[in-house]
């Protein structure tokens, strides 16, 4: 299967970066065609410009500034996101990837002002993430990134598609044991793709 | 009240700019001191670089990457965010501002062991989100208003215990009319005259 793996962490020696590398290795070993997108390594600019905003609804030209990212998204059959949760959300570089690449005519169409999701080439999504806060505290805040995955992303991909959300909470208190246990969970989830 | 208005929209002639103007004018007319921060106009860079992330947990106020923004945040008694909701959340520009400016030792302190972080923004007694959404209201509630939650729950936990909240949204922007837009500006004006 063709799998797009999107990663957003600035530090190469971070736990998150090692999750990204493990994800690529595991998927390749399992015989998938893996397309890695490392947004920091790419120097991706997450800021939607004035022109992009003005051309947002013009499906003939709106994808031009991010054409290669759009092509790779549309070729993917599965999507894996590997990123840390910062301030109850995506790092800006990943939020901007959604803002700029998930465009009308790419991931959705507008019919009479209503959104019709169209990213039906993607049949499953796996989210691999880490939080500073505890699960309880995050739950109190409404866990925005989990909702984005389970509701927004689920509604965007092929109907009936699978969304799996794996999170290591309280990273500041993590130990070798908790990190290894999490990696094992991630491996099992990757083997199901 | 000293109110910091953080604004993020790429198009100077957008409806969101009109919302910003209504916010600023209403606050000033009611005797508040307004400090407007326009992230696009400043060319703020929302991407936290590797070096900053490496030292994030140990960061001290003296090493803050944006001392001017840190000072303005410390001076604020109220904080209002004016932005378009994109993918149910904050534009990357504004998300990155939270990531890079709301640092340890300025907005919170990380404890040495287990336990919650200690809030340091207790001088903020009013927190507001004034936004525009493409999605309808019911679907925004289904998705759970992630942007609103990020600010009005996540960031609020760092503010005064009694911090009041304001939330205003114009839903279904793609079907908006001059009437719905001017009604929304009126709602903004009425609500902010009353804080």
Image (spheres, rainbow, N blue to C red):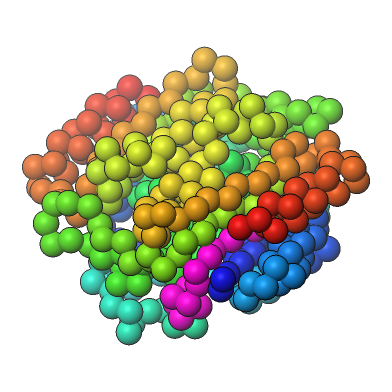
x 75%, y 56%: residue: B189
- How many discs mark residues in the rendered view? 0
Side of B39 where B162 appears, left or right: left
What residue appears at the point 49 percent right and 36 percent down from the top-left corner?
Answer: A148
Q: Nearer the viewer, residue B83 or A18?
A: B83
The reply to whether the magenta stretch includes residue A60 is no
Which residue occupies the foreground of this view, B179 or B191?
B191
State the residue in front, A115 or B29.
Answer: B29
Q: Quadrant of the N terminus of chain A?
A: top left
Residue B190 % position (x, y): 74, 52
Q: Position of residue B181 (x, y in %)?
A: 83, 47
Answer above or below: position of B142 versus B112.
above
Outermost right residue: B178
Identify the image quadrant of residue A159.
top right
User: What segment is highlighted magenta in the picture?
Assistant: B70-82
Question: Residue at position x 91%, y 46% from top?
Answer: B178
Quarter location, residue A155: top right
Task: Please state the horizontal and vertical placement of residue A145, each as a whole percent of the image.
Answer: 43, 40
Res A30 quadrant in image: top left
One can see residue A104 in this view: no
Residue A182 in sight? yes
Q: Is residue A122 above or below residue A55?
A: above
On the picture, is B154 further left or further right than B174? left
Q: Is residue A61 left or right of residue B148?
A: right
Residue at 35% over, 72% down = B106
Q: Is residue B74 magenta?
A: yes
- Which quadrant of the rendered structure holds the C terminus of chain A? top left
- Residue B80: percent from left, percent from top: 58, 61
């Amino acid at each position: 299967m063709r799998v797009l793996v999107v990663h957003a962490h600035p530090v190469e020696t971070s736990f998150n970066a090692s999750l990204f590398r493990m994800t690529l290795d595991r998927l390749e070993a399992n015989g998938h065609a893996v397309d890695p997108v490392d947004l920091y390594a790419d120097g991706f600019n997450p800021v939607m410009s004035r022109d992009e905003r003005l051309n947002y609804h013009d499906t003939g030209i709106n994808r031009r500034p991010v054409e290669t990212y759009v092509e790779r998204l549309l070729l993917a059959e599965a999507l894996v996101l590997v990123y840390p949760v910062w301030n109850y959300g995506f790092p800006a570089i990943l939020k901007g990837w959604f803002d700029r690449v998930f465009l009308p005519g790419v991931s959705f169409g507008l019919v009479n002002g209503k959104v019709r999701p169209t990213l039906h080439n993607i049949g499953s999504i796996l989210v691999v993430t880490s939080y500073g806060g505890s699960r309880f505290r995050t739950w109190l805040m409404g866990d925005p990134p989990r909702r984005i995955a389970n509701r927004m992303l689920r509604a965007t991909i092929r109907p009936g598609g699978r969304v799996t959300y794996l999170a290591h909470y309280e990273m500041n208190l993590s130990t070798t044991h908790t990190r290894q246990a999490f990696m094992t969970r991630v491996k099992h989830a990757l083997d199901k793709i | 009240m000293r109110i910091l208005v953080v604004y993020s929209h790429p198009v100077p002639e957008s409806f969101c700019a009109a919302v910003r103007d209504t916010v600023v004018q209403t606050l000033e007319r009611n005797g508040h001191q307004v400090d407007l921060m326009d992230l696009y106009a400043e060319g703020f860079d929302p991407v936290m670089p590797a070096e900053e992330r490496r030292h994030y947990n140990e960061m001290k106020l003296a090493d803050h990457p944006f001392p001017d923004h840190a000072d303005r945040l410390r001076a604020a008694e109220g904080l209002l965010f004016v932005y378009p909701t994109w993918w149910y959340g904050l534009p990357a520009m504004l998300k990155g501002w939270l990531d890079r400016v709301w640092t340890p030792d300025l907005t919170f302190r990380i404890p040495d062991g287990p336990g919650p972080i200690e809030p340091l923004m207790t001088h903020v007694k009013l927190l507001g989100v004034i936004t525009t959404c493409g999605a309808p209201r019911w679907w925004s509630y289904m998705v759970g208003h992630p942007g609103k939650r990020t600010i009005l729950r996540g960031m609020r936990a760092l503010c005064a215990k009694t911090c009041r909240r304001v939330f205003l949204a114009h839903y279904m922007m793609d079907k908006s009319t001059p009437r719905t837009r001017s009604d929304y500006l009126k709602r903004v004006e009425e609500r902010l005259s009353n804080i």
